[in-house]
Each structure stands twice: as structure tokens, then as C-alpha cells.
Image (tube, coloured by chain):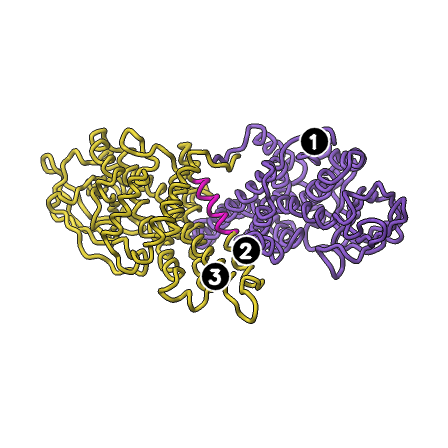
Amino acid sequence: MQFELTEEQELVKANMREFCEKYVEPVANEIDYEARFPAENIRRLAEQDMLGIPYPEEYGGAGSDYLTYVMTVEELARACAATGFLVETNTSLVCFSLYKYGSEDQKKKYLAPLCKGDALGAFALGERGLAGDAATTTAVSDGDGYVLNGVKTFVMNAPVAGIFVVFADVAKSGGAGGPSAFIVSADTPGLEVGKPLDKMGARGAPSSEVVLKDCRIPKENLLGQEGQGAVIAGASLDSGRIGIAALALGIAQAALEESVRHSKERVQFGQAICNFQAIQWMIANMGTEIEVCRYLTYYAAWCYDQGLPYSEEAAIAKLMASETAVHQSDRAVQIHGGIGTVKGQKVERLYRDAKITQIHGGTPEFTKMIIADCVLG
Amino acid sequence: MDFELSEKQKKIRETAAKFVKDELEPIAAELDRTKDREMLLATLKKLAGLGFMGIAIDPEYGGTGAETVSFSLVMTEIGRACASTAVTTSVTNMVAEVIQTVGTEELRRKYIPRLCSGEYAAGGFVLTEAVAGSDPASMRTSAVLEGDHWVLNGQKIFISSAEFAGVFVVWAVSDKEARKGRGISAFLVEPSFPGFRVGLAEKKLGQLASPTNEVIFDNCRVPKENLLGVCNDGFRIAASELAGGRIGIGSMALGIGLSAIDFAANYAKERMECGRRIADREGIRSVIAENCARLKGARLMLLRAASLKDQKKFYAREASMAKVYATETANRACHDAMQIVGDYGYTLGCPTERYYRDARVTEIYEGTSEIQRLIIARELLR
């Protein structure tokens, strides 16, 4: 039982922090204000081999472990949640699904560019009316390929993605049928990406609808087996939850650091406000809750790396860390007072960025059901 | 990072879990109801026999030679069944440890083996006074050196195991002129020393089998060899020991919370209302899930603090975080468990009412949650 990072992990974490402080933090507010996709961040991360950290080098990854990846996401989100989301969606959701369920050819053709940063991935699962279960988007087999029709909503990265994993229902005809996963390149005729949504937070990570209109893809682009879609989605979301927990941790950590800094500088009633117990209590609560969530997240990542079951652990990490991101960013604004609600203050951005961590990848209502299923059966 | 327990740690935990299941769980409710002293003492003796009174103590002094992670695991297992037994065990371990850490070789050889073997039923930690709770430095019990004895005068309150402990660590003001906190010393006191008297037992809400008494020092004569550690360094010793005690109490509280939720979950799987098990209702499932998540977090935080202590690294911040988080989580779990069980959970026939009563004080003793927050904030604001 030991909680220390390896030397290599410490080094990666330190490098990432330095990288973020130098490149990512200085543009974070601007990215948020303008809802601008930070192409330069992605390019630099790609140059540092940071987009496929947990995947083997033969597929363009860094050949490291999930825990190391999770720490880099935490560092990214500490500086800029939007950049964190861009990476997490690419690496936890899309890359994972390709790595675990893709054929060798698919991995070489689609996983490698995502790991190397030649393209970003998007995960097109949710629909208007049926989030979480693929259903009304259909895929009809014509022998050599599939024709996809339907509308996917809230697809993060869609406006800037080069490769999509799309979930659609295959009618039972010759094959097995059922919910299935497909790899669709952005330039495939019939795939239309909608306008980026004007979002509350994570504004630099654009999300939009994806419309599939007689979008024909070759049969080689079926990911896994027909009917395996629910399993692929479930497994990808499990690994994604650890990533989102890490994102949430980064936001929460930034909230704490801003609060500590501000409360030491801000003088009211003749002394720094950090001398008042009400503020000390809040900071103590923030620090404690973040620390607890950190170990829950690292534990889930460790389980993943050990090849142990991790669905419950990932759900717990995501539930707790996202809640802590929302709480701590709220407390941070409170500690800042009026200035905390003004654009340009980091905590104002953190407050808006935090909320989506509680929704995307499984709401608390849903993750609690996953945990309850594990505990109660 | 490695969350795997060693084989030795797994074995210690299994031994504790087996003892708790076979011998402690069956008597826990009766212990609480009757406060049967013989039953408690017999249990403590058996725990000593298993090496659980000196878990992290050097085998040279009769200890088990394990570490704080094992201590945390054992406290959680004992806490699952009986908080009274657990708190007695935790404090006894702390007393053995403080003697090992700062005591002379003579004091170690004299007292630690008796604590570890069960010859002494327990150790006592005598710090608190009516005027000095969260602020122990303002204590008034005095210690004056007269020839080859220290003479102690004063009154201590809320002392666990006072009625049967074999040795007590007692803090007293040894230099009245010193700055606050700088003139306190620690002493080892046996109940047979002249002038030592155990006063009235408190009537409490919970942890009923663990007696909590006044202890009175009326010209109590303590041999000067029984000064523990360096003269006037007592406050630092207390603070240091309390940090370790936080891991014990937090771990014990975790056990209470786990038992409460386990009971509620099992109950919910049987209880039918409106034609369905209440365990199938989303509202109930949701509450159980939240508590499981928080209890898991508490477990990791406690082990983190224990792990730091074992590496002799600074651990006060993590110990305070673990204590405040685990005890508040446990109390929430007990509250929610009783709610799930409903009316029956409020009756003496159901363990949830005992868990609820037993959990409450864990947010108070060995450093209130408020004090923990002050410590945490001080560290974060450095």
C-alpha cells in the first residue's frame, strides 16, 4: 500500500504543469471568452506525444499507463478545462473504443492519427430524446457497407474532429443486428456537423449536433461486432469517467489555489480574510474533499492499469470528483466575493466549466445507479 | 502508486475480521445494553492475545511489529462491530506508542509489554480538563517536583477506560512561569500511586460499554523516573500522539459507517413496500450509492495518512483530513441507514440505533472537526 508516484510519473506531471503554465494558462481566458478552439494547444500537445499517453507506441501512443494519463488531464484542466475536455474526449472515449475493439487495420488507420494528434476524435452517442442508449440512428447494411441515418446531439469535439465513432442501430436482417459502433471519417459524404453550441462552460471544446443523412461507410468500418454497440459504449464511458474525474479534479484544484491566494491577499476589517474562521473552514473543506476525490480517481486509474474491474470505481470517482469540482468552484467564487463573478477572473470561468463535469459522461443520477447495481445487485 | 495490501496486512485484517465476526459481533448489542465489564475485559484480553493492543509496536517490547496501515485496517474491523471496544483498543495502542516514542528504556520495558499482552486491560490518555478541551495548553493540573517524586494536583475529565486502565499518560503543568504550552510535561501514572482517584462515570449517549470518567489527582505522588519524555515538552508529545490517534478514530468511525450501510442495504433487499423491495427504488439505491462512494473515499484518505506516518513523513494534515472526513461520512451513513430502515431502525432491536449513537462522538473527541479544520487550513494557507 503506497501512494507515491514513480519517478517517471512525477516527471511527466511536472513537465505537464510547466507546459500548461507556459502555453495553456495564458490563453485560457481568451479561449473561453471567444469560444475559440485552441488549435495551438492541441498541436503542442501532439508534439509532446500527449494525445495517446496510455496507448502502445506501435499505434502512435506514448506506451505509458492510465494513471499517468489521468494526471496529465488533471494538469490540463487546472489550466484550461476546455483543452482538457478536447484531450479527454479524444483519448478516453474515442481512442479507447478503437484500441479495445478495433481490428489491427482499424487501429493503424484510425487510432494512430488520433494518438499522434493528426486528427481529433469525437464520440457520437447521445440523441435528442434518448441520451445514453443508441437507438433511433439507424445503420442499414447493403452487403458491402452500411448507410447511416439519424441525428446525434451534444457531440463534443464534433466541429473539429477528423474521426467519429458513431453508434447506430442495425436492423436484424442477415447479420446479428442491434446497437453497433461505426468509424466515420469527417469527410464522409452524408456526415454533417452542426454549428457549435453556445455553451456555458468548456467553451473552447466545441460541441454540436452531428447529422447523418444517407451516410455510407464501408463494412470494414464496423467497430467490433454488430450488436456490440452497448458493450463498446459502456466500456468506453467507464474509462471516460476516470478521465472526467481527472478533469474535475483539475478544476477543483485550481479553485482551491485561487482561493488560498486571494484570501491571503484580500484585506478586510484590517486583516487578510484568511484569518477569519469562516474562510478557513471553507478552505479546509475544499482541500479535504479534493484530496479524497484525488485518491478515488487515482484508485480507479490504478484498477484500470492492473486489469482489475473498474466500472464501479470509475463511477465513484466521477460522481465524487465532479461534485467536488462544482462545490469547490462555488466556494471559490464565494471567497472572491464580487470580483469572483467578473469575466477575466479565473474562478468565474472555473464555476462555469465545472458544471458539465457533473453531466457529461454520466450524470450523478446515472452513476449512482451504476454503483447501486454493483453494491445491491 | 500501489493500492494492493501486503500479504501480512491482508492476514492481519483477516484475523481481525474473523475475531470480530465470531466473537465480537455476537456480544456487541449486549455490551452496549448491559455495559457488562467482565464481558468487555474478556474481549480486550482476547484482542491483546491477537496482538491488537500494540499493532505498530516493536516486538522487542511485546508488540506486533506491524504498521499504521495495519492499525487502520484493524480499527475499522473492530469498529464494524463495537465502537466501545474499538476506542479502548485505539487509545491503548496510542498509549503504548507514546511510551515507545519518548519513554526511557526502563519505562518502555516496564509498561509496554503489559499493555501489549493484556496484563493491563487498557491504557489511559489523560489530557482533557473542564477548562481545557480543544485548548489543552490551558490546563491547570499541576506537577511539582518534590525530592524524587512529582506531585500532581488537579482534575481531568472525559477519560476513557479510567476504571480499568493499568497505566495512564497524564499531562500536567510542570512550569507555571513558562509561556502557555511550553511548561507542560507528561507522566506515566499507575492507579495504585497514592493520591490517584477515579471519579464519577459520565452518562453518555453512545459508546456505553467504554466508561468515561473524571480522574482526580490529590497530591498524587509519581516517581520522577515516570516523567515521560523531556520535561516541559509534553504539549508537543500530546499533539504528536493525537495526530496518530486521529487515524485510529477515523478508521473506527469508518467501520461504524460501513456496518450501518451494510445493514441498511441488506434490509432494503428484504423489505417490501407497495409490492416491491425498497432496494429496487431509485431513491433508496441512490442514497446507498452515495454513502458507499463517500465511505470508499474515507478509506483511501485514512490509508493515505497511515502510509505517510509509516514512512515517517509529515502526516498531520492528512490525518486531520482523514479524521474529519471519515467521522462526518460515518455519521451521515448512520443517519441515512436509519432512514432507510425506517421506524424499526429507531428501536433497540436494530443495530442502526446503536451505530447512530456510537458514531456521534467521533466528530468530537480526539480533536473536534472544528480543530481539524483549523489544522488543515493552517497547512493549506502556508
The amino acid type, in three-letter code, at marker 1 is Pro
Look at the image and give the colour of chain A.
purple
Residue B10: image location, x then y, percent: 44, 38
* Quarter of the rendering occupied by the C terminus of chain B: top left
Chain of the residue under label 3: B
Q: Residue furthest bottom?
A: B274
Whether residue A223 is visible: yes
Side of B341 relative to B242 (left or right): right
Instruction: In the rendered structure, find residue A376 and report the number of the disc placed on it.
Output: 2
Within 10 angstroms of label 1, few (less than 14), some, or many (20 or more) residues? some
Residue A295: image location, x then y, percent: 52, 42
- Secondary element type, mark 2: helix
Task: Judge if badges 3 and 1 mark residues of a common chain.
Answer: no
Q: Residue at x 35, y 65 (%)?
A: B348
Separation of disc 2 and disc 3 at Cα?
Answer: 11 Å
Q: Which residue is mark 3?
A: B267
Whether residue B236 is visible: no
Q: Residue at x 53, y 46 (%)?
A: A293
Residue B184: image location, x then y, percent: 23, 41
Chain of the residue under label 2: A
- Secondary element type, mark 1: loop
Q: Is residue B176 above or below residue B2?
A: below
The span picked out in magenta is B293-305
Is B70 part of what is drawn in magenta? no
Within 10 angstroms of label 3, few (less than 14), some, or many (20 or more) residues? some
Q: State the residue in front, B341 or B96.
A: B341
